[in-house]
Amino acid sequence: MFADLHLHSSFSDGTYSPEELAGYAARYGLGVVALTDHDSVEGCERMAAACLRRGVEFVPGTELTAELDGHELHLLGYYVDTRHPCLLHALAKFQEVRQNRIREMVGRLNRLNVPLAAEAVFALANCRAPGRPHVARALVQGGFCTNLDEAFERYLKKRRPAWVPKFKMSALEAVDLIHHAGGVAVLAHPGLNCVDDLIPDLVAAGMDGVECFHTKHSTATTEHYLLVAEQYGLLVTGGSDCHGMSKGKPLIGTIRLPCDYLPPLKARRCLRQAGLPQAAPAFAPAEPALIVFQ
Ligand SMILES: [Zn+2]
Ligand SMILES: [Zn+2]
């Protein structure tokens, strides 16, 4: 049985509804899936219900953008209590920051003679955690760019004229917030952020695991982070980071994490929810994860 523990829905910048994701999970034979929307847990309730109907195990989660020593990194929070007041308060704050950032980006576009309205972006996003992909989609929809790549290249990529720096919480605070909400904190796609030097500090802060298997990790990168996980006694996770279609096919299920990795994650969840200090069992999977290239 396999898992995909990194999925985005239309409650952040994914294009599928929670129900569509649950449908694909069942169709692709995934036994376990996690929803990890950016700065949101709003889709978790619907996805839990949809997964239940389809006999797929569901892991509630979120993905927080954070920084440490000036480097951006993403932290996945698995098994967080999606009704925890402190978590919901923090997420509401991050969502407000996201909405303000959209307004700033649109303001810059307007000054570049691109008459895009912030309302058009919000209407298209139709969620509380809008992001740059929504601005890109609105630029294409409004006929200002021919495709998403052009929107990013011309306007939205880092240091392009409509790019606005993003507020990020400290990574140590993010780990604390996830733990406070009873969750397990996992460093997302470390291979994309070049944050190896920060791992000791994150481990010292109580970070629980590392996402070794990711669609954009090469085999060598995956092997490197499996060694890092072993070195620091970190849990191993993996997921496709599906935001919708990629190269004509849904990305969900392109990482098939053996479910052998789940019991240690669940054991850590029990420790976190009991407020106990972490135990770090060395763990070797029975079979390696499969990466399906579509
Ligand atoms: Zn991410
Ligand atoms: Zn993600």
Image: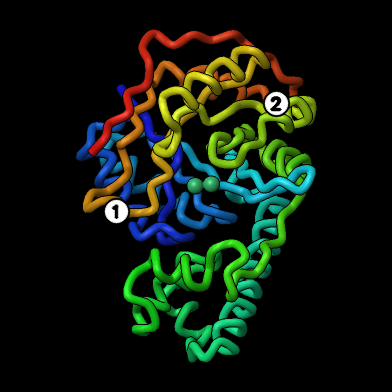
Which residue is disc 1 drawn over? 245
**Which residue is labeled 2 in the image?**
274
Above or below residue 224? Residue 80 is below
* Count of picture labels: 2
Q: Residue at x 58, y 28 (%)?
A: 210
- Residue 58, can we see it? no
Which quadrant would residue 159 be assigned to in this image?
A: bottom right
Q: Nearer the viewer, residue 228 or 40?
A: 228
Q: Nearer the viewer, residue 122 or 147?
A: 147
Q: Position of residue 51 (x, y in %)?
A: 33, 42
Q: Amino acid at mark 1?
A: Met
Image point (34%, 79%), residue name:
141
Is residue 281 among what the camera can see? yes
**Location of the N terminus (image quadrant):** top left
Q: Quadrant of residue 184?
A: top right
Query: Horizontally, is 112 left or right of 238 in the view?
Result: right
Report the quarter where the C terminus lies. Answer: top left
Q: Position of residue 107 (x, y in %)?
A: 61, 84
Q: Position of residue 104 (x, y in %)?
A: 64, 78
Q: Secondary structure at mark 2?
A: loop
Q: Label 2 vs label 1: CA separation?
A: 39 Å
Q: Are marks 2 and 1 in contact (CB under 8 Å)?
A: no
> Which residue shows up at 43% across the image and 71% down it?
151
Work out whether mark 2 precedes mark 1 in sequence or the reverse, and give the earlier one: 1
- Is 223 left or right of 77, judged from the image as shown? left
Mark 1 lies on a secondary structure that is strand
Q: Is residue 246 left or right of residue 112?
A: left
Judged by depth in the image, the label closer to the viewer, 2 or 1, is 1
Vertical side of 197 occupied by 109: above or below: below
Picture colour scheme = rainbow
